[in-house]
Amino acid sequence: MAHDRKFRFGVQTGGATSAREWHDKVRRIEALGYSTLYMPDHFIDTPYAPMVGIAMAAEATESLRVGTLVLGNDYKHPAVVAKEFASIDVLSDGRVEAGMGAGWMTADYDALGLPYESHGTRIERLGEALAILKGAWGPEPFSLEGRHYTIKDYDGIPKPTQKPHPPILVGGGGPKLLRLAGREADIVGINPNLRAGEISRDAAQDTVAARTKQKIEWVREGAGDRFDDLELQIRYFVAAITDDRHALAEAMAPAVGLDPHEALESGVAVVGTVDECCDILVRRREEWGVSYIVLGDDQFETFAPVVDRLTGT
Amino acid sequence: MPHRRKFRFGVMCSHADSATDFREKARKAEAFGYSTLFVPDHFIDHPLAPMPAMATAAAVTDTLRIGSLVLGNDYKHPVVLAREAATLDLLSDGRLELGLGAGWMTADYDKAGLELDRPGVRIDRLGEAVTILKGLMGDDPFTFHGKHYNVTELDGEPKPVQQPHPPFIIGGGGPKILALAAREAAIVGINANLRGGVAISDDTAQSMTGSATDEKLARLRAAAGDRFDDLEIQSFVGFTNFTDDRQALAEMMAGAFGVAPEEALETPVVLAGTLEQMIDDLRDRRERWEMSYVVVGVDVMEQFAPAVARLAGT
């Protein structure tokens, strides 16, 4: 079914410092009108394990959706991941968004002592993992003889509450990944290309508007007829409410190797007054079809007026 | 004078009809005075994955402890598990008991296409995993180079509330796993030997007779040395049957498992009889085998609650 492209908003957050603070934070995010709480999956500088954090967040809220942005596929076996997402979907009465990525941050692989294989191999493995998730969530026992995984006659339990399965979110920045996402995902995250294995100037420069259009073309190539059914998402790494967007751009641009105009037009930046930010997001939805906006920990309070104005429109 | 090993009780919640039912079971376990709600970790049969289930049980209760009985070490990398366990301990305000096993159920490995190595290798890997878990929960960046895992200068996050780490439960039946438990665990589960890869067989039943249990305790005691008095000894009672005629039941079970009727009643995995007989058996087993931490199935949680009321904390 064609997606309606109505705006909704999410928050990506790594956790809090105590159980009480986490509880209060996720309830606050719900109260501000955000659709979804996402947790990242890294072993350095992110406080909480996502599967535990989102299970607790779901329990503390009524309608907030919970998800991962995104799980690194290589860190956990997909049969385990399938069961955990399905369990949280059942426990949350159908509020899960299953975000999956190929894994990219070299520091994570170092932490686990895992080999950091070529991106082609990691993406191929993610493709098999997505097939395992869907298979485990489907009504029948299934088998898969892959290059990376072998599943034998596995009837996954529990079956998720959302049918046919929780929305699968796949995020990425390169052609292989985005074609895979177009083919298999329900929500596609348009990200910087992180081939360098860390957040770098290379990644920042990959966010200029022309690159974003190219990425959406890759999604379209993978999706074919499904393209209209997909929900497109951007995680805005630079988001600020300010009366002087040009001053901010001047200050920010050199650090990421862009000129100030490019910085403002970057596909991961939304900077300006509430009116300006709303206009930018509406214009980009027309140009790119992106209707699902994700903000960070330090932005969700200040962006609440934008969320209030645009959600559901 | 109170016994030096005070009784406490756990419930093994191996199934729930729905999310609502699971929450209800957790709340009831707390209300009935059980110390801990445990969840298993298998790909088949058990409906909820352990980490989300424990998180939910903790969220709907105030004092109930939550635990895994047990996590199969081979299903998750210990660096991943360390972070999940510490997060769970943090978000439950220090109520986690981390039960770990070497992995044994053939079906789990088959379904997920995992290599089922021989027991010695799996136990060796579990030993390394325990070292990594403790290392990452400690204060400083941690480095470990083992046969199975490599961790370099990693400062585990978050840190758990319970210090130095949540209590580890290691259960098993064979000498190698008991030696590991004696060295590393706070709570030791005295289990059947599951080398056959399935839960119920003549082999597992015969490995849990009274005399076989005597041997396990002797082995544990020898391996633990000075640590033995600090260990909490746990038994999971898989078969609980309230009856006025336990002799008849014993004869039936004896036939099914190839043991003598008196052996069927003696094994610590069985509680059969009236409530009074069960209470007597539990006291006897504590004297004979030091078993003060008793886990029963969720099906009998309510029926067994009077025993909990009588014995917990004594």
Image (tube, helix red, strand yellow):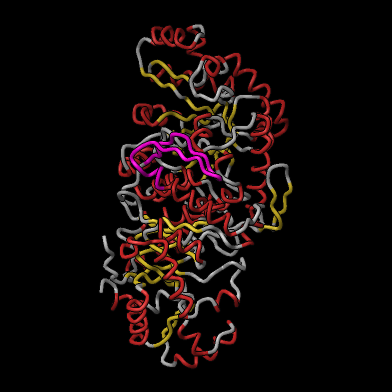
Q: Position of residue A220 (x, y in %)?
A: 39, 66
Q: Position of residue B131 (x, y in %)?
A: 68, 44
Magenta stretch containing residue B271, yes or no? no
Q: In the rendered image, which quarter contains the N terminus of chain B?
A: top right
Q: Position of residue A60 (x, y in %)?
A: 36, 57
Q: Residue at x 43, y 84 (%)?
A: A271
Please say if A131 is above or below A181: above
Q: Quadrant of residue A195?
A: bottom right
Magenta stretch containing residue A156, yes or no? yes
Q: Name the one closer to the observer, B21 or B78.
A: B78
Q: Position of residue B272 (x, y in %)?
A: 42, 16
Q: Is residue A197 left or right of residue B226?
A: left
Q: Name the one closer to the observer, B211 or A205.
A: A205
Please say if A310 is above or below B60: below
Q: Residue at x 53, y 56 (%)?
A: A123
Q: Is residue B17 left or right of residue A197?
A: left
Question: Can you see residue A284?
Answer: yes
Q: Name the one closer to the observer, A32 or A185.
A: A185
Q: Name the one closer to the observer, B34 or A222.
A: A222
Q: Quadrant of residue A137?
A: top left
User: Which residue range is magenta in the image?
Assistant: A134-158
